[in-house]
């Protein structure tokens, strides 16, 4: 459990040290340094670019090391419960046989996956809920 008495920077660092946040939620790249605070997932630099291009009203991305996080942003990330928890919700709606992009995926492959993740079925309302 990440206590509220810790500093914001420490709480964010502790979030990424959790087992299921040590890999990008979208492509499984190790050691992600970005997070979508309203979706509640940590992502790598390559997937960050796709999230950023979608717009902050849908995916509000922040750097784990460079940006200042508000208590609300940290609390929202904690509430989601990590990448595994978020993915178990969002990926439920994927078409049968659909797989995540790999580490060597192109920008286009990542974009297709992330946009499908965000806009398939009822997921869009789930993302807006965490805004």
Image (spheres, rainbow, N blue to C red):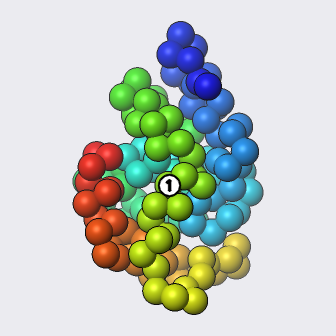
Q: Residue at x 68, y 77 (%)?
A: 102
Q: Residue at x 41, y 51 (%)?
A: 39
Name the residue carrying label 1: 86
Q: Residue at x 44, y 65 (%)?
A: 90
Q: Where 119 falls versus 58 (above or below)?
A: below
Instruction: Tell me residue 130's x, y (percent).
Output: 32, 46
Query: How would you rate the neighbour count of disc 1 (Cα within 10 Å): few for under 14, some for 14-19, many for 20 or more?
Result: some
Instruction: Tell me residue 113's x, y (percent).
Output: 48, 78
Quadrant containing the N terminus in the rendered view: top right
Q: Where 52 falls versus 93 (above or below)?
A: above
Q: Where 128 falls versus 2 (above or below)?
A: below
Instruction: Tell me residue 119's x, y (percent).
Output: 32, 73
- Identify the secondary structure beneath mark 1: helix
123, 27: nearer the viewer: 123
Instruction: Tell me residue 46's x, y (percent).
Output: 58, 65
Relative to 35, 127 lies left or right: left
Q: Where 104 falls versus 129 (above or below)?
A: below
Residue reaching furthest top? 5
24, 1: nearer the viewer: 1
Residue reaching furthest bottom? 97
Tell me, yes or no, if residue 76 can be seen here. Answer: yes
Relative to 72, 109 lies left or right: right
Q: Residue at x 53, y 76 (%)?
A: 110
Q: How many marks?
A: 1
97, 109: nearer the viewer: 97
Tell me, yes or no, if residue 7 can be seen here. Answer: no
């Amino acid at each position: 459990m990440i206590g509220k008495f810790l500093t914001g920077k420490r709480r964010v660092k502790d979030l990424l040290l959790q087992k299921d946040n040590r890999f990008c939620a979208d492509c499984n790249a190790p050691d992600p340094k970005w997070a979508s605070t309203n979706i509640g997932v940590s992502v790598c630099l390559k997937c960050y670019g796709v999230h950023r291009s979608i717009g902050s009203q849908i995916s509000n991305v922040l750097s784990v090391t460079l940006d200042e996080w508000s208590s609300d942003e940290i609390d929202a990330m904690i509430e989601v419960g990590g990448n595994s928890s978020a993915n178990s919700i969002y990926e439920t709606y994927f078409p049968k046989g659909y797989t995540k992009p790999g580490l060597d995926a192109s920008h286009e492959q990542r974009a297709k996956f992330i946009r499908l993740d965000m806009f398939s079925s009822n997921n869009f309302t789930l993302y807006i809920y965490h805004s």
